[in-house]
Amino acid sequence: MSLKNNLHKLKEKYNGTKMAPLFNGFHTFLYTPNEITHGGTHIKAADDLKRTMNTVIMALVPCLIFGMFNAGYQHHLALGDIQAANGFFGATFWSWDNLVVGLWKVLPLVIVSYGVGLAIEFLFAVIKGHEIEEGYLVTGMLVPLIVPIDLPLWMLAVAVAFGVVIGKEVFGGTGMNILNPALTIRAFLFFAYPTWMSGDKVWVHGAVERAQEIAGGANVDAISGETVLGSLAQGHEASYSVADMFFGMIPGSVGETSTLLILLGGLFLIFTKIGSWRIMLSSVVGALVMGLIFNGVVDAGWISESSKFYGLMSTEFWHHLLIGGFAFGAVFMATDPVTASQTNKGKWIYGFLIGFISILIRVFNPAYPEGVMLAILLMNVFAPTIDHYVVQGNVKKRMKRLKAKTA
């Protein structure tokens, strides 16, 4: 209690100074502000931006913890140190050795993401003289979950700086950006450092080092960390079962592999009324429709098995929901309340097009079979346009009804 009282006293000392945003940010992180409103009627609610962000982080934590175990599991499995686990509940998967490797590789990604991102947020708050915005709390957690396990930390730091400054701050900060900051960071990484964001050597810890040793003439076995999408894009059959893909025991980005935990996180966001179920559901419908179209093309014999598109085209339409980052993007990225459509009808259109375009890019771009990132960024740009025409359509309907009544 004495700490709280002392902080309230120090707050009065820092008010009006350039360091006020930093102190206020630290103060509100620990305690509820001691400010009260005066006069008039005010809406009373328990939710605010910080609580909203914390709720999303809670939904992401299971994916983070699972990603740590999976990172170690894929590493030891590729080295031949362990055999494939006996299902999702197998003791081999949930071993301490797997967690140690995951902690060693994933925690630095989280620390760099938050350290660089929050430092820039604090800097802009001091320069502009406004309160520190909590928007990066979720972005800082999302970024480590959508990058490869062995991504160099300096690359991540550069990308985070680009995403926060160019993707958000130049537009005015949290609530003003038109692109999802986390996806902006991932897009920067993909186009600036493509060899670290694609291929079959970046998704399993140690695979890159083994490839370099082989290139240097060392007599070592290679580690293949090819993802399900990468394998299908090359025309090979997936070597993982549906159960492995659903539970997430496959190579991939840190937090994108477990469809089960992503589904549970989505249900949690819907229950707390933070995530839009319309966007999630319509994204799934859009993906299924596009997948069915491609399956129909294959069944009709309009494409030969020698085509480079055949592998992903012939994939069961519903399998597209279990592989790659589609589920993670539909639940945690597409539903970003700042960059998504705001109208109910607009959310249906926005989500459907994300799912539809994701599978379209996935199939027709074998060099980059994961299309959900580009699909969401594209629809971020068109979200205001979708809402504009939805609103204008409603206005026209009401004008017609008004004319009909006055006629």
Image (cartoon, helix red, strand yellow):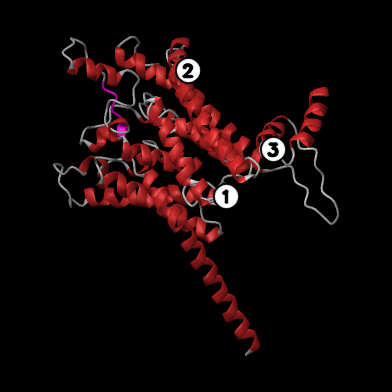
Pick whichever of labels 2 and 1 is earlier in the sequence.
Answer: 2
| Disc 2 crowd, CA 10 A, few/some/many (<14, 14-19, 20+) | some
Residue located at (51% from left, 59% from top):
346
- Of tags 2 and 1, the one toward the viewer is 1
- What amino acid does circle 1 point to? Gly
3D distance between C-alphas at marks 1 and 3: 22 Å
Q: Residue furthest bottom?
A: 407
Q: According to the image, label 1 marks what residue?
A: 175
Position of residue 262 relative to residue 42, above or below, is above
- What amino acid does circle 2 point to? Leu
Pick whichever of labels 1 and 3 is earlier in the sequence.
Answer: 3
Pick whichever of labels 2 and 3 is earlier in the sequence.
Answer: 3
Residue in front for this viewpoint, 194 or 94: 194
- What amino acid does circle 3 point to? Ala
Q: According to the image, label 2 marks what residue?
A: 103
Q: Badges 2 and 3: C-beta atoms under 8 Å apart?
A: no
- Of tags 1 and 3, the one toward the viewer is 3
Q: Badges 2 and 1: C-beta atoms under 8 Å apart?
A: no
Q: In the picture, residue 39 is in which quadrant?
A: bottom right
Q: Is residue 264 visible?
A: no
3D distance between C-alphas at marks 2 and 3: 35 Å
Residue in front for this viewpoint, 141 or 174: 174
Q: Which residues are magenta?
A: 224-229
Position of residue 336 relative to residue 67, above or below, is below
Query: Picture coordinates of residue 178 (x, y %)?
Result: 48, 52
Residue 20, numbered circle = 3
Q: In the picture, residue 21 is in which quadrant?
A: top right
